[in-house]
Image (cartoon, rainbow, N blue to C red):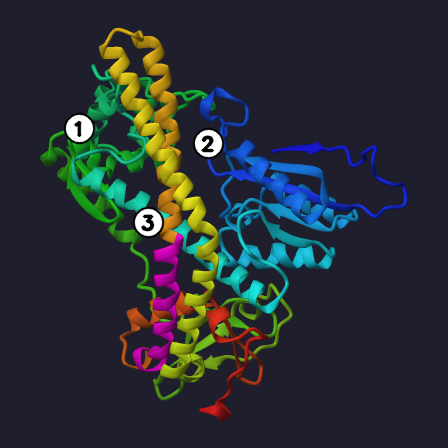
Amino acid sequence: MTTATLDTKTSDESADAPVLLAVSYLRVSTREQAERGGTEEGFSIPAQREANARKADELGARIVREFIDAGESARSADRDGLQEMLAFIAASRVQFCIVHKLDRLARNRADDVKIHEALLTAGVTLVSATESIDQTPSGMLVHGIMSSVAEFYSRNLATEVSKGLTQKVAQGGTPGRAPIGYLNVRQTDDQGREIRTVEVDAERAPLIAWAFEQYAGGETSVTALLRDITTRGLVSVPSPKRPSKPLGKNALYRVLTNPYYAGVIRYKGALHPGAHEPIVEPALFDQVQSLLKARNAHATRHVQHAHHLKGMLHCGTCGSRMLLDFATNPRGTTYAYFVCSGRATKKTTCTRRAVPVQVAERLVEYSYANITISEDDYRQLASEVDAAFDERGVGRDQEFADLTTNRARLEAESDKLLAAHFADAIDLPPLKRHQDRIRAGLTDIEHRLREHNEQRVGGRAFLHDSQRLLTDAHRAYTHSDDGTRRLANQAFYTRLEITEDEQLRPRLAEPFATIVHDGPPPSFGPDAL
């Protein structure tokens, strides 16, 4: 995070003339972006700075402070540059906060609302250098939609990364860091491409194999095995931030239960054959698992009761989570209740009485009837979304055309350089240097084109799908099983509070909150049922 204070005075300004002041906020998501090109700021930060400066000129404002978060994700608002900017705004007379795009400021709706409230409280207007947002109703609609689109893009990007890891695992690759006994190795092939592989650690692998063999003998415990293998010298692999150290009991237990050592990768609960060399035979690994399960059988915990509302309900009096509990009457009949955890653990002075499970279920079911929209409402909302996207797209068509033109220019430049090299007009080292520059530029352009397309197509489809879900919300919920109901509650709501008089105060998740209502969430009680 860096900040810069800029000069606010010019020779041609009258001492009595009012000066509009602004702050500029710049951000890139990864450290690689921040250092791209071998410079302190990479390529993106200067481009954002230039666009923000142009916007300030259009507003007739002068940028007095610049705040930069380099290599910081917008998924969280806990960023040094952002927090320092909000503190500066609260203590100064700034009129504008300029960002290159809304997703530079936040990529989830909750943080966007908090940041925007802080700006409004300070009397500061949020301005985007590339997007048409203002304090008018239409401008606020666009702001809300774009904030939801940014959150969708962020989550979709995480899904794409997960998809890539899944494909890697399917091909036998290792996701992430290899466990102790193996080493992550980076190599370069003849074409200069980086290849990442996993190799057996010649120093630690024999000790891992010895540990499996010792435990399979049935004459030692995990605690005794840890003592023996530490004496033999097994320590973790050092890293730039952490030195080598002996394993703990839990770490050794994870080693003994990790099928990776038998040539199998466990990823997202499924097992996949790995391309790495196994350290132990599958039969030996299975023998160790049998012994571990037999010795842990006496420690089996009681089965936990499951319910599709667990984890979602909160006490409307003290805010504590509500827990599922059971009571049995003298006749042996068992009843299920949700009780306030604050009262049960005496962490609060709450006197909230228990809520029968059936009452909680009816309250939540009715809330879906309240948020369900009609087909006419859906068509009207869909047309408003399309209009907002079309209006915003007009300003981005030129950007898309410029990106396409620049891509063609870089590709043509690359072809000319190759032709010059084949004609012996340019040596290999400068060719590589120029091609690396071109490749970096093309990568950035492709990323921005994908983002442009995602916001035009993916974001529009996301909001249409969300609206369509609301047209069938109540019927779908009432006809779903418990597992599907749990997923629905997690998708539609961020919190469900039950008050002392058994009223439900639901908090809708985005984008449903923006679609359904702009005011405070309604309450639903038994009278409405």
Amino acid residing under circle 2:
Gln
Q: Secondary structure at mark 2?
A: helix
> Farthest residue toward the right?
16
Q: Nearer the viewer, residue 330 or 286?
A: 286
Amino acid residing under circle 3:
Thr
Q: Is residue 327 visible to the viewer in this orientation of the structure?
A: no
Residue where numbered disc 2 is placed: 33
Decide if residue 91 is on the left or right side of residue 156.
right
Decide if residue 513 is on the left or right side of residue 7.
left
Q: Is residue 79 visible to the viewer in this orientation of the structure?
A: yes
What is the magenta range? 455-476
Asked if residue 465 is among those painted magenta in the image, a careful observer would answer yes
Residue 385's quadrant in the figure?
bottom left
Q: Residue at x 80, y 34 (%)?
A: 10
Give me the C-alpha separation between circle 3 and circle 2: 21 Å
Q: Which quadrant holds the N terminus?
A: top right
Is the magenta region chiefly helix, strand or loop?
helix
Q: Is residue 145 above or below residue 269?
A: below
Q: Callout 2: few (<14), some (14-19), or many (20+) C-alpha neighbours within 10 Å?
A: some
Q: Is residue 81 above or below residue 296?
A: above
Residue where numbered disc 1 is placed: 276
Residue where numbered disc 3 is placed: 159
Q: Secondary structure at mark 1?
A: loop
